[in-house]
Image (cartoon, rainbow, N blue to C red):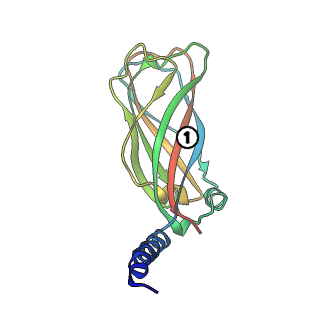
């Protein structure tokens, strides 16, 4: 074999070997979303600027099933954070969030203390029947790995509410985990 052939082939083999080593050493990750919806009812009020709290019923996470469906396990999860929290009025028809001045939303679970996850301040009167909240950048895997969690809405009204208002609380969590 000539030395020219050797010098041409050696860099190609070296590049192939390095590429193989670099790609095989990478940790393979997956990202997926888990959505939950719960419901709260705001009882009619007679006062303004009255702070009050509303709790959702316990929301079952089914996290083990969600992890398994996405080829991972709880111990492989690297991060879970909230990517969407939206409030939708489902009844009465035509009702808007104009009665709200502000809202803070907290998550808690049987094994973990409450943590603020979202908020909306200075809600305008023309907001409509859907309210997308601002998010707090928080690590939430402890809550989603638990069997259930609850959300607590701390609200301040700026007008009276003549009748009960039913609100769907929609959440989307982004999971980043290592694949099995």
Q: Nearer the viewer, residue 85 or 91?
A: 85
In the picture, residue 93 is in which quadrant?
Answer: top right
Please identify the residue farthest to the left as the structure is shown: 122
Instruction: Please tell me whether residue 33 is drawn above or below residue 15 in the rendered image.
Output: above
Q: x%, y% of residue 13? A: 45, 77
Question: Is residue 57 rendered to the left or right of residue 160?
Answer: right
Question: Is residue 90 rendered to the left or right of residue 53?
Answer: right
Q: x%, y% of residue 67? A: 61, 60
The residue sitting at 46% across, 46% down in the picture is: 82
Please identify the residue farthest to the front as the structure is shown: 2
Question: Is residue 69 rendered to the left or right of residue 50?
Answer: right
Say which residue label 1 marks: 56
Instruction: Please tell me whether residue 72 is drawn above or below residue 33 in the rendered image.
Output: below
The residue sitting at 43% across, 79% down in the picture is: 5
Q: Nearer the viewer, residue 66 or 166?
A: 66
Q: Looking at the figure, which quarter contains the C terminus?
A: bottom right
Tell me the SS state at disc 1: loop
The residue sitting at 51% across, 54% down in the picture is: 175
Instruction: Please tell me whether residue 2 is drawn above or below residue 70 in the rendered image.
Output: below
How many numbered circles are shown?
1
């Amino acid at each position: 074999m000539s030395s020219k052939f050797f010098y041409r082939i050696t860099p190609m083999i070296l590049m192939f070997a390095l590429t193989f080593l670099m790609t095989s050493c990478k940790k393979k990750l997956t990202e997926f979303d888990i959505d939950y919806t719960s419901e709260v009812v705001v009882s009619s009020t007679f006062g303004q600027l009255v702070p009050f709290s509303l709790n959702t019923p316990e929301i079952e996470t089914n996290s083990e099933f969600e992890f398994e469906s996405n080829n991972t396990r709880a111990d492989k999860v690297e991060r879970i954070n909230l990517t969407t929290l939206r409030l939708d009025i489902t009844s009465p028809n035509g009702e808007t969030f104009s009665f709200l001045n502000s809202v803070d939303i907290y998550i808690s679970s049987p094994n973990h203390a409450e943590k603020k996850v979202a908020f909306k301040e200075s809600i305008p009167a023309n907001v409509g029947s859907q309210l997308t909240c601002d998010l707090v950048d928080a690590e939430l895997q402890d809550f989603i790995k638990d069997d259930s969690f609850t959300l607590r809405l701390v609200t301040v009204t700026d007008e009276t509410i003549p009748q009960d208002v039913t609100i769907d609380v929609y959440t989307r969590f982004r999971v980043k985990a290592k694949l099995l």
